[in-house]
Image (tube, rainbow, N blue to C red):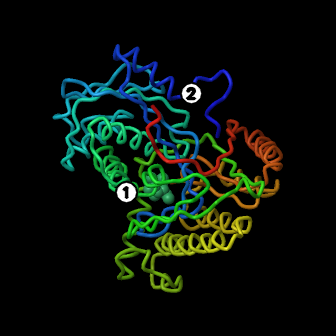
Amino acid sequence: MDTRQPGVTPPQERAALRFSEQFGTDPGGIWRAPGRVNLIGEHTDYNDGFVLPFAIGAGVSVAAACRNDDLIAVTSGQVPGGTVTVPLADLKPGSVRGWAAYPAGVAWALRGAGYPVGGISLAIDADLAVGSGLSSSAALECATALAMIDLNAITMPRTELAGLARLAENDFVGAPTGIMDQTAVLCGEANHVLLLDCRTRATTQIPFDLGALGLTIVIIDTRARHELIDGGYATRRAACEEAARLLGVPALRDIADPGAIDRLADPVLRRRARHVVTENDRVLRTVELLRGGQLAAIGPLLTASHASLRDDFEVSWPQANTAVGTAISAGALGARMTGGGFGGSVIAMAAVDQVSAIAGAVKREFAAHSWPQPAFSTAWPSPSARRTR
Ligand code: GLA
């Protein structure tokens, strides 16, 4: 996704302009955090398993400066209305609602961990759609987290910062998500996918040079919107924890033999657990293929992941199933929903010269169902969050 389109002001410049308009001074700097695509390994992170995401070009920009009072003031180009202002000392879970809870929660998490974050003004702008399944929340958290630590001369390993951004989302915002998104946003590298062992937090960069093979990842935003605070995500998570408890293991990561799942009497728990166990295996097989230089051969694993999310984990949605099926019929090597599910985006791996045929076929299918038209973009592994000015 190229954020530099002719005639379109890039989000970092819009954030800087908004900062000057709202706060009457220039920002002290601008920080940018990308969204992410998860190549494979869905709903495995909170089961201590394996994930394989990469940072994309689209993301969130934050223009920021220290204040000489103890307030956090945030304004966003994507949200109508003015600036949300809260005294830092008043921050507690539930005290800020809506989008402003993400930056406020990051300040709360950093301060709670003993880091001296003082008053700060933040102006946000983005070229990543909220609810599109590409981690707009993690991008917002991580861009503001970097601004806060840089402006306060705090240093810490990025994995620690990822943990604090996740804490903000879990405990301040109230979305019980795993550690994948923040780690992808803060630790991704161009031309690589990030293998994350969610138990040990060990990260390994795996080469993923799509361009060298004339391939790309097409992102199909199905325009059906999701909310991780809704019940579906938390219910899946609770079912996985219950299955692990009944199987006598700390987490479903510890089940290597899918046959062990048959011991679960409840068919729903059996399906949920089967997804997690088979998905961890698909991630490791994908990594093996990539390490063996067989990038184009991973397609069937992506498609199998989608089938498992649709049938066993039951987090897919009609537009995603149609987009996956149609993309494959139109020549994609593999396709799957990406992210938490219940809405958001599908990814399809395809030859660059197949992209327009795939987009045309998917558009026709959506029109035939009278669904709003999907949005298409192409993505490749891009650099992680950073200061841009
Ligand atoms: C969301 C969460 C992640 C992960 C995915 C599903 O994106 O934020 O932690 O659980 O769903 O793989």
Question: Is disc 1 placed on a helix, strand or loop?
Answer: helix
Q: Residue 31: horizontal and vertical position, in percent?
A: 43, 35
Which residue is labeled 2 in the image? Answer: 10
Q: Residue 362: horizontal and vertical position, in percent?
A: 76, 46
| Left or right: 270 as drawn, with respect to 238 | right
Amino acid at dot 2: Pro
Quarter of the image for the N terminus: give it: top right
| Left or right: 341 as drawn, with respect to 292 | left
Q: Residue 352: horizontal and vertical position, in percent?
A: 78, 49
The earlier-in-sequence mark between 2 and 1 is 2
Q: Residue 263: horizontal and vertical position, in percent?
A: 45, 85
For the question of whether residue 38 can be seen, the reply is: yes
Question: Is disc 2 placed on a helix, strand or loop?
Answer: loop
Q: Quadrant of residue 111?
A: top left
Task: Tell me whether the residue at label 2 lies in contact with that at label 1, contact meaning CB atoms closer than 8 angstroms.
Answer: no
User: Disc 2 beta carbon < 8 A from ligand 1?
Assistant: no
In front: 173, or 141? 141
For disc 2, the neighbor class at 10 Å (few under 14, some 14 to 19, many from 20) is some
Up-down: is 207 above or below 356? Answer: below
Q: Residue at x 17, y 34 (%)?
A: 90
Mark seen at residue 159: 1
Q: How many marks?
A: 2
Up-down: is 216 above or below 366? Answer: below
| Left or right: 46 as drawn, with respect to 96 | right
Mark seen at residue 125: none
Quarter of the image for the C terminus: give it: top left
Amino acid at dot 1: Thr
Residue lying furthest left? 89
For disc 1, the neighbor class at 10 Å (few under 14, some 14 to 19, many from 20) is some
For the question of whether residue 232 can be seen, the reply is: no
